[in-house]
Image (spheres, rainbow, N blue to C red):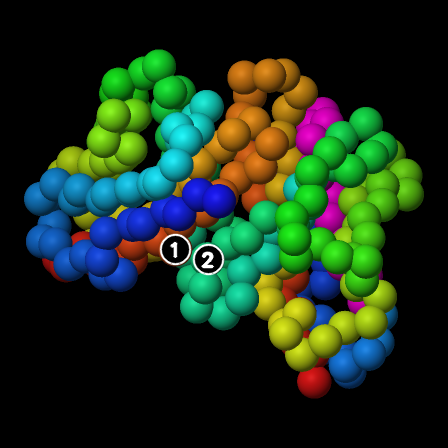
Amino acid sequence: SQKIEQNSEALNIQEGKTATLTCNYTNYSPAYLQWYRQDPGRGPVFLLLIRENEKEKRKERLKVTFDTTLKQSLFHITASQPADSATYLCALDDRRALTFGSGTRLQVQP
Amino acid sequence: EPEVTQTPSHQVTQMGQEVILRCVPISNHLYFYWYRQILGQKVEFLVSFYNNEISEKSEIFDDQFSVERPDGSNFTLKIRSTKLEDSAMYFCASREQGWDNNEQFFGPGTRLTVL
């Protein structure tokens, strides 16, 4: 079965800097890779999806890359704000179900 | 903006009791899911449901679990005889029809506490 690793349990950065979160997986490359945001006690909220044949996807201050050779996705938040503080989940999507990583907790300091 | 709703927000039950968790998916969505998240752990897939039948289920989804779409709006998860280890947040999710519309919309969750 797939193993998914997300970098470090917590990431602390200063407001205005770029946050970079890593998602590594083993075994096969999924059809899609998705990123979600989860706030404490809440359900995941979809942010971005990237397909296996795409290298990069952008949406406002967010950017996702997908390298099927390295079996890795990077998630960037530029010009970070304290409101971006949350746990960010990587999820592998094989068109049947989502397999989530354990998440990276991002704390943006003002 | 349409959203997935779940009731109750918190359910406390005694071990061995049956519980039913309820979800109202977004109205034009056709794929429905249940996930669970044990405190401090990752979100885990339980089951997916399409066209009135289970599409996929995980190893967690054993005979104690069942799902149903009793009418045109509700989607329920039943746990027949709860165990202590069933204590978790249970999330319902839905998505549109379409091979490429893979964004899943999650509800706020039901916190299940088994005593």
Spot occupied by residue B86 in the image (x, y as percentages of width and height) = 66, 70
Report the disc number at residue A34. none
Report the residue at 49% width, 69% height from top. Answer: B39
Q: Is residue B29 magenta?
A: yes
Q: Residue under mark 1: which chain is it in?
A: A
A16 or A95, which lies in front? Answer: A95
Q: Is residue A9 above or below residue B68?
A: below
Report the residue at 56% width, 27% height from top. Answer: A95
The picture quadrant where one finds residue A35 is: top left
Count of numbered marks: 2
Measure how far apart labels 1 and 2 are at the Cα level. Answer: 5 Å
Report the residue at 60% width, 67% height from top. Answer: B88
Q: Residue under mark 2: which chain is it in?
A: B
Local crowd size for mark 1, using a 10 Å CA cut-off: few (<14), some (14–19), many (≥20) = many
Visible in this render: residue B92?
Answer: no
Q: Are marks 1 and 2 in contact (CB under 8 Å)?
A: yes
Give the amino acid at mark 1. Ser
Visible in this render: residue B16?
Answer: yes
Q: Are marks 1 and 2 on the same chain?
A: no
Spot occupied by residue B55 in the image (x, y as percentages of width and height) = 73, 34
A81 or B87, which lies in front? Answer: B87
Local crowd size for mark 2, using a 10 Å CA cut-off: few (<14), some (14–19), many (≥20) = some
Report the residue at 16% width, 36% height from top. Answer: A78
Residues shaded magenta: B19-32
Q: Is residue B69 magenta?
A: no
A33 horizontally vs A95: left or right? left
A86 or B57, which lies in front? Answer: B57
Which residue is denoted by mark 2 in the rendering?
Answer: B42
Which residue is denoted by mark 1 in the rendering?
Answer: A102
Spot occupied by residue B70 in the image (x, y as percentages of width and height) = 90, 43
Give the amino acid at mark 2. Lys
Q: Secondary structure at mark 1?
A: loop
